[in-house]
Image (spheres, rainbow, N blue to C red):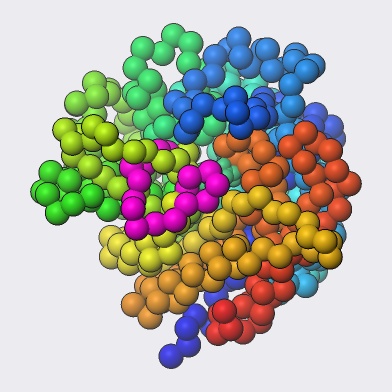
Amino acid sequence: MAKFPKNFLWGGATSANQIEGTFLEQGKGWSTADIDKFIPKEQRKSGPADNLVKRADVEFAMHDKKGIYPKRNGIDFYHHYKEDIALLAEAGFKMFRISISWPRIFPNGDDKEPNEEGLRFYDKVFDECRKKKIEPLVTLSHFEMPLNLVLKQNGWLSRKTVDDFVHYADVVFNRYKNKVRYWITFNEINVLEMSGFTSGGILADNIANRKEARYQAAHHQFVASALAVKKCHEIIPNASIGAMIARFESYPKTCNPKDALANVRANQNNLFFSDVQIRGYYPSYIKRFFKDNDIHLKINDGDKKILREGTADFLAFSYYSSMVAISPDATEGEKLTSGNLKLSFQNPYLRSNDWGWQFDPIGLRIALNELYDRYQVPLFVVENGLGAKDKLSKDNRIHDDYRIDYLKQHIEQIGEAYQDGVEIMGYLIWGCIDLVSASSCEMSKRYGIVYVDLDDYGKGTLKRKKKDSYYWYKKVVESNGLIL
Ligand code: BG6
């Protein structure tokens, strides 16, 4: 039996706000990502915060002349897209995941007419992909939204944002119906559970129950996603449109039933989002969680039907590291470590990268098995990779064997999961071209197999360079995963 399916979609992934640049040009409006400031490591608080952004913070950032806001410039993909897509094509990429910047299409989010220049830009990107035989996978919302909708109606906390989003989705589905067949509605929708601003555009002013606000925003995103799925099927009958979560594979620390129960809760907390989007209804366990946290959602008549009729075709997920669950009465003295937007207790069996993210290739095989058991829909690993500090060596090359080792081990486990019977659509390396970090706005946390000459302070030639991992991945793709 082949290690990987015949039409396996090998490739890489990015997001608009981390690569494009062209801040407030070509008709683009302010994005929530444009106010993300670079903070040097020494000044950073450990781990991801509750993402408390207030109106005053937004207004400050919009007028700040001193701070560094790297997502405004990205890696200037806007002007390098041809060169970048050519590099990916040369590595044999079958798929390239990008996102559309909503404020590039609707600068204020609620404009009547879209910005033609913005639409034209993505036309060019998709045409270039097609020319190079690369299938684009497009995320409608990847950690950004028009800032105007935040200031005007508090982002996803408002039901009105559902209509604005569906209008945007309708416009891009119609425009790109002959160019894009694979879509994702929201990037890592479950990140809303901890990051109200990044994922939900919620301002922290006057919010009495932040948890409730985040779950209300999630409800609006579920409805918007389901409506977009339905629309996508009507407008592009041969399209496949998926939901996406950040998978936090979790293990109980011990076989103490209390730890096992904490692990069940951790999984429910993570999978609530895909439960709604894949099954089409709220799972029964969430009632107790809402009761315990005094969460009362406003759910319109008809929402249940919308959720039922708009279930996603596949489940995409990101996977970087795993977590450890410990009974709440036994956590004293346990050490925490960072992960993808979430802290975890440390796992003594795993190694970490420089940011404390503990990597766990076998956890990916477990995740694939568990998610497939639970949903029985095709799965797609749309983000995985190693954030590391790459150095140019004396021969002017980047010898990133540590990245090759990381990717190799994860790909091996995907092959194993496929042998286990899991239906897997493909594998995309996160940040296949170095890009601005989502959480820290650094450039020095690099994921790419293509290096970009740019530092944390926006200095550099922007020249692209193939790393050792580039040549290695090319062989992996060519051999459909047989040569690792
Ligand atoms: C995921 C996001 O959470 O992780 C990406 O979808 C992000 O946008 C990636 O870049 C890695 O996180 P970071 O913080 O290292 O950039």
Q: Which residue is drawn at 41% across and 60% down?
A: 360
Along the viewing direction, whichever of 484 and 311 lies nearer the viewer: 484
Picture quarter with the C terminus: bottom right
Please provide the residue range marked out in magenta: 342-357
Residue 314 in percent (x, y) is at 44, 60
The residue at the far left in this view is 257
x%, y% of residue 439?
57, 37
Look at the image and say whether residue 348 sits in the magenta stretch.
Answer: yes
Q: Quadrant of the N terminus?
A: bottom left
Does the stretch in magenta take in 12?
no
- Residue at coordinates 64% horizontally, 46% vertically from top-left? 445
Q: Locate residue 82: give its quadrant.
A: bottom right
Question: Quick check: can you spot residue 137?
Answer: no
User: What residue lies at 43% left-to-right and 64% top-to-bottom?
Assistant: 361
- Considering the whole magenta stretch, tell me its main secondary structure: loop
Q: Is residue 266 visible?
A: yes
